[in-house]
């Protein structure tokens, strides 16, 4: 009798009764148990099959291991001296590219970010700005760099434009998201004083997003330096070009020196950017 | 001075927040607007300064039709209506002085406000107001470093720096303790008397409303159901506004589920209360 009654209870009532007896489990994320376990088992099977499909050529690995040992051996004696001038020139070019592209990119990203925030901009502008962001984020820096190298020729100009372009997408998207998370009451209060749109931006929006804007800019500076050494490989100048040249000449000791310098600079950026972000809060 | 006639608001979702509001507010009158949550109190005062667009009716402030204004004209109208918010709505990362001076935004141009070069008279007045609300020492503190009551005082100073003719006050005491609530209400009351300002105060605390307002208007489901003196607000009237409740016992929160007879009367009232909370 009581069993029949229980089957008629809704799930909610059943849970309430169980809770009364002191039996309670968290609600599962996916309610249907078949779907839940099906998804888990499916994912595991796919993973196993995918791993099994990766072919490993052990002979090639054994051969390559020897080269890798050479390469790593060179790291033990990095050579900063023999290509000193090239390294310094490449490094300066990279740093110039990094700074200029970050400044230009951030300046261009601010209006795009404002336009891409749904809560403060009208629909047509929103779509245009979101499209700019989408285009900028779709292509990886290397692909954009190849395009700009074709357009502007080899050298740091192509690299700078590439990085500035990538910065727009990155900064504008994150800035727009931050603006969409604004405290609306503060904006409303400033609007209620009779402030114009620009005054509202300056008095209610800017104070709320400034810490994040500064933090992201510093973070992007750091990313742009790392990217500048990568896009150099496709001809966009900077330390990457120097690295690529040394690798193709089998001067692994010089390459090692360049990589060490890059690591040190990235570490410095990392350290200082986390400091700046803490300070702006 | 302020006249609302036939004002209605329907949100795009189809919810009716206000229906056919008729209200006249003479100069210097402090009016409390009471009613259950969702009755349309906030919508009503936001319709007056057009933070929310009314969908029908007309609102006139000293002969100016507010519902038709746009752009520059709307901003000029807004600056003559100071607004005080629930939870203060100060800009947290700006200093107290910047927050108070933002009351001048309707009067100064963009570059002046961008460079924070406000006219000297405005700065003098802002400081005088901060002294009046008792916070002259806090000018360079960040707004988020103040306590609740202090923030609300800054909010009041900001609203008054607009040299308004009308104060729109949205739940000024909702996040304050009882003592600070009374102090803030008294301050608003005094300032209105000093400057001969009219005020509409949305408030949940009926006792405070009766104590500090000249007139009480009760709103239920977007319609005015009571309009009179604080002394005329009886228990029956409160039942009309809020739904059934034992109004004469002290403000101890009733535990409805504790008592069976209470529970049944609570459930009987549910449909009416649900109607009241639908906007």
Image: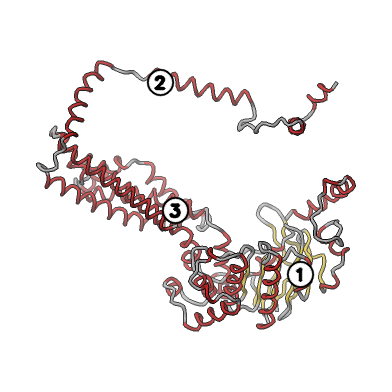
Residue bearing the label numbered 2: A51
**Residue at (40%, 54%) from the top-left corner?**
A277
Residue bearing the label numbered 1: B209
Give SS at disc 1.
helix
**Residue at (46%, 73%) from the top-left corner?**
B113
Which of the chains bears the disc numbered 1?
B
Q: Which one is nearer the viewer's eye here, A167 or B65?
A: A167
Where is residue B198 shown, x and y percent of the image?
69, 77
Q: Which one is nearer the viewer's eye here, B157 or B250?
A: B250
Residue bearing the label numbered 3: A175
- Which of the image's four quarters has the C terminus of chain B? bottom right
Q: Above or below — where is B255 with respect to A3?
A: below
Which of the chains bears the disc numbered 3?
A
- Mark 2 crowd level (few <14, some 14–19, many ≥20, 10 Å Cα): few
Which of the chains bears the disc numbered 2?
A
Query: What is the quadrant of residue B195 in the picture?
Result: bottom right
């Amino acid at each position: 009798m009581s069993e029949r009654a229980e089957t008629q209870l809704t799930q909610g009532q059943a849970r309430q009764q169980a809770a009364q007896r002191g039996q309670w489990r968290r609600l599962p994320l996916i309610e249907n148990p078949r779907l839940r376990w099906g998804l888990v088992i499916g994912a595991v099977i796919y993973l196993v099959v995918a791993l099994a499909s990766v072919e490993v050529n052990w002979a090639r690995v054994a051969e390559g291991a020897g080269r890798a040992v050479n390469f790593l051996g060179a790291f033990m004696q990095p050579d900063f001296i023999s290509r000193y001038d090239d390294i310094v020139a490449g490094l300066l070019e990279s740093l110039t590219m990094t700074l200029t592209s970050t400044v230009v990119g951030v300046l261009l990203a601010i209006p795009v970010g404002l336009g891409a925030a749904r809560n403060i901009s009208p629909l047509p502008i929103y779509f245009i700005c979101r499209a700019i962001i989408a285009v900028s984020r779709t292509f990886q820096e290397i692909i954009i760099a190849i395009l700009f190298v074709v357009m502007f020729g080899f050298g740091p100009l192509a690299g700078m434009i590439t990085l500035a372009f990538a910065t727009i997408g990155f900064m504008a998207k994150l800035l727009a998201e931050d603006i969409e998370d604004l405290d609306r009451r503060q904006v409303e209060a400033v609007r209620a004083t009779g402030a114009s749109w620009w005054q509202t931006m300056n008095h209610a929006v800017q104070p709320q997003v400034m810490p994040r804007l500064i933090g992201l800019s510093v973070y992007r500076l750091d990313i742009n330096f790392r990217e500048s050494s990568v896009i150099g490989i496709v001809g966009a100048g900077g330390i990457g070009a120097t690295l690529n040249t040394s690798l193709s000449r089998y001067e692994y000791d010089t390459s090692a020196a360049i990589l060490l310098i890059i690591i040190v600079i990235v570490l410095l950026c990392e350290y200082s950017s986390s400091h700046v972000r803490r300070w702006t809060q | 001075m302020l006249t609302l006639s036939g004002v209605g608001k329907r949100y795009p979702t189809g919810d009716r927040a206000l229906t056919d509001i008729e209200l006249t507010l003479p100069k210097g009158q402090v009016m409390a607007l009471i009613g259950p949550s969702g009755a349309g109190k906030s919508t009503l005062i936001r319709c007056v300064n057009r933070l929310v667009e009314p969908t029908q009716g007309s609102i006139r402030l000293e002969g100016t039709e507010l519902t038709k204004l746009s752009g520059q004209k709307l901003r000029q109208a807004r600056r003559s209506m100071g607004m005080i918010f629930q939870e203060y709505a100060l800009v947290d990362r700006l200093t107290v002085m910047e927050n108070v001076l933002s009351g001048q935004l309707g009067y100064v141009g963009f570059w002046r406000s961008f460079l924070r070069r406000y006219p000297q008279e405005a700065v003098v007045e802002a400081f005088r107001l901060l002294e009046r609300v008792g916070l002259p020492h806090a000018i360079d503190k960040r707004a988020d470093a103040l306590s609740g009551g202090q923030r609300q005082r800054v909010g009041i100073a900001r609203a008054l720096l607009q040299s308004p003719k009308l104060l729109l006050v949205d739940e000024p005491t909702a996040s304050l303790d009882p003592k600070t609530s009374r102090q803030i209400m008294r301050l608003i009351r005094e300032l209105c008397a000093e400057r001969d300002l009219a005020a509409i105060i949305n408030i949940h605390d009926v006792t405070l409303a009766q104590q500090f307002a000249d007139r009480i208007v009760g709103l239920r489901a977007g319609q005015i159901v009571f309009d009179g003196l604080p002394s005329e607000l009886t228990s029956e009237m409160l039942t009309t506004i809020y739904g059934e409740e034992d109004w004469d016992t002290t403000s101890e929160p009733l535990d409805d589920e504790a008592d069976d007879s209470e529970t049944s009367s609570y459930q009987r009232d549910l449909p009416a209360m649900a109607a009241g909370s639908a906007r």
